[in-house]
Amino acid sequence: MDTAAYQAFTVELTRRADADGRFRGLVALGSMAARDYAPDDFSDHDFFVVAWPGHAETLRQERGWLPRAEDVALAFRETAHGLKVVYRDGHLLEFAVFDLEELSFARVNRYRVLLDKGGVTERMDERARDTAAELQRTAPDDAWLFGQWLTQVLVGVGRHARGEGLSGRSRLYEAVRLFCLLLARHVPAPAASLLDGLDPVRRVERVYPETGGELARALAGDTPGLARTLLRLAERELSHVPAYPRDGVAAVRARLDSLRR
């Protein structure tokens, strides 16, 4: 969906919500919110519907309020409040329907209120503050993150060597996620505001072009190569962190080398 079509869809969705008496508000999320970055040809529509009391479940079950409802190819309930919809042209919607009180279940960072018929902006601002505080309060310490990262690498290469390629690769994917979390925490970058506190692998290539590019290329290769790249990048980018596990990294590197023989 190109930019013009994307914006037209947003306008039509907002118009329909405004005209429907069951809607209390509409909140754009992620790329749709157009904060820090604009949507592109690969962006989906990610949003919250805020319903007046008694209407939330009806809106979750109905599809007629969506633009181009006749073109929906797939729709399913993902969570108690959330749904995913795929159109015949491949465009994706990810949305949740709440009443105002149910918004307490939501975690948010980037958002833009498109429609507010009572209390929505105030509640979203509150949820954003609470989400930021929760992420800070529950963030694991560096020792835990480094330990989890390194043992995921170790287990992943071991399973790969055993012939469990799928399981081994999944461990390395988790190691990539943990590495990106540590990178964002300890390596400043001019474009750091583009990173996503709820998903640490989002836009890493844009914020850290060199490191992100090397990691992306390694992901296209084999599992042992990805493991070696993770160890090398961690040494280059994160060895200044007091909790960096030098002896542990050396042990895992030696294990990797032994598997090559």
Image (cartoon, helix red, strand yellow):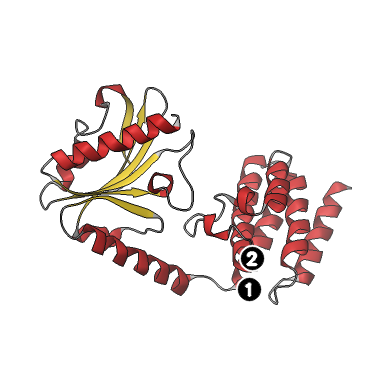
- The disc labelled 1 sits on which kind of residue? Ala
- SS category of the residue bearing label 2: loop
Farthest residue, direction right: 261
* Residue 158 visible in rendering: no
From the viewer's perspective, is 107 left or right of 214? left
Where residue 171 appears, as percent x and y from the top left, is: 62, 51
Q: Name the residue under label 2.
A: 188
- The disc labelled 2 sits on which kind of residue? Pro
Farthest residue, direction front: 4
Where residue 40 is drawn, which disc sits there?
Answer: none
- In the image, residue 54 above or below residue 88: below
Q: Name the residue under label 1.
A: 143
| Real-space Cα separation, disc 1 to disc 2, in angstroms | 20 Å
From the viewer's perspective, is 158 left or right of 24? right
Where residue 6 appears, as percent x and y from the top left, is: 39, 33
Q: State the residue at coordinates (32%, 44%).
A: 95
From the viewer's perspective, is 225 left or right of 108? right
Q: Residues within 10 Å of mark 2 (few under 14, many from 20)?
A: few
Foreground label between 1 and 2: 2
Q: State the residue at coordinates (29%, 37%).
A: 11
Q: State the residue at coordinates (25%, 40%).
A: 14
- SS category of the residue bearing label 1: helix
Where residue 19 appears, as percent x and y from the top left, is: 14, 39
Farthest residue, direction bottom: 242
Sequence-wise, the earlier of marks 1 and 2 is: 1
- Marks counted in the figure total 2
* Quarter of the figure with residue 152: bottom right
Specify the quadrant that holds the N terminus.
top left
